[in-house]
Image: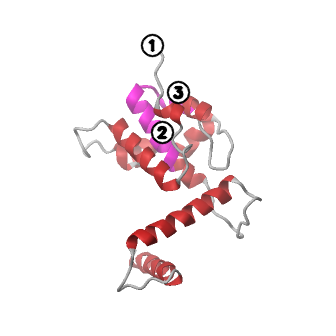
């Protein structure tokens, strides 16, 4: 475990050094902006393969989609008391994967599988006074801002009204 931590520390130090930062004078806001530029670059590579030069063995998008779909399923099931399959159908209709394709409901469920057991927002002991679906909503908006992608949390899902 500590070996992984030291590897991570080395990667962070290299990231900082390559961008002209040192440990005595680190502008953390600038570091955050640079990291977000990196994330946005890789997101564009994932969305538009071939249009952006992609290094060999490029980033896989499954993990980005997994987190996103976990939050969206948690948001829809919590807010509207529907099952996961219905939530996956709604997400499929209004969402696009980071590769620019419309995901099938089965793919969404496969990617998000285990979200009830594994996801930190499934722990009810956190913030008893706030419904779980609101915590998913806040996280989705935050991730949308961090990635700079307005389609990360589609408006149709954010404003979804359960049919009466």
Q: Secondary structure at mark 3?
A: helix
Q: Is residue 73 above or below residue 55?
A: above
Q: Horizontal and vertical percent for residue 30?
A: 44, 71
Cα distance in 3D space between marks 2 and 1: 21 Å
Q: Horizontal and vertical percent for residue 55?
A: 70, 70
Q: Earlier in the sequence, mark 2 or mark 3?
A: 2
Q: Is residue 119 above or below residue 84?
A: below
On the image, numbered disc 2 is attached to which residue? 72
- Mark 1 crowd level (few <14, some 14–19, many ≥20, 10 Å Cα): few
Q: Horizontal and vertical percent for residue 83?
A: 47, 28
Q: Do tag 3 and tag 1 residues touch (Cβ < 8 Å)? A: no
Question: Is residue 52 visible in this depiction of the protein?
Answer: yes
Left or right relative to 125: residue 92: right
Which range of residues does the magenta coloring cover?
Answer: 67-88
Residue 129 included in the magenta stretch of the image: no
Quarter of the image for residue 49 reads bottom right
Question: Is residue 113 visible in this depiction of the protein?
Answer: no
On the image, numbered disc 3 is attached to which residue? 86
On the image, numbered disc 1 is attached to which residue? 164
Q: Secondary structure at mark 2?
A: helix
Residue at image location 22% in from the left, 38% down from the top:
129
């Amino acid at each position: 475990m500590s070996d992984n931590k030291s590897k991570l520390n080395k990667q962070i130090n290299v990231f900082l050094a390559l961008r002209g930062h040192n440990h005595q004078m680190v502008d953390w806001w600038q570091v955050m902006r640079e990291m977000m530029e990196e994330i946005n670059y890789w997101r564009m590579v994932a969305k538009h393969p071939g249009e952006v030069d992609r290094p060999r063995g490029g980033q896989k998008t499954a993990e980005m989609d997994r987190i996103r779909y976990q939050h969206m399923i948690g948001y829809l099931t919590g807010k509207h008391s529907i099952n996961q399959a219905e939530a996956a159908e709604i997400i499929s209709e209004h969402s696009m994967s980071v590769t620019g394709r419309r995901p099938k409901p089965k793919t969404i469920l496969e990617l998000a599988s285990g979200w009830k057991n594994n996801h930190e927002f499934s722990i009810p002991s956190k913030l008893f006074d706030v419904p779980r679906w609101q915590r998913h909503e806040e996280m989705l908006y935050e991730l949308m801002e961090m990635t700079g992608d307005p389609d990360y949390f589609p408006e149709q899902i954010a404003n979804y009204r359960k049919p009466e």
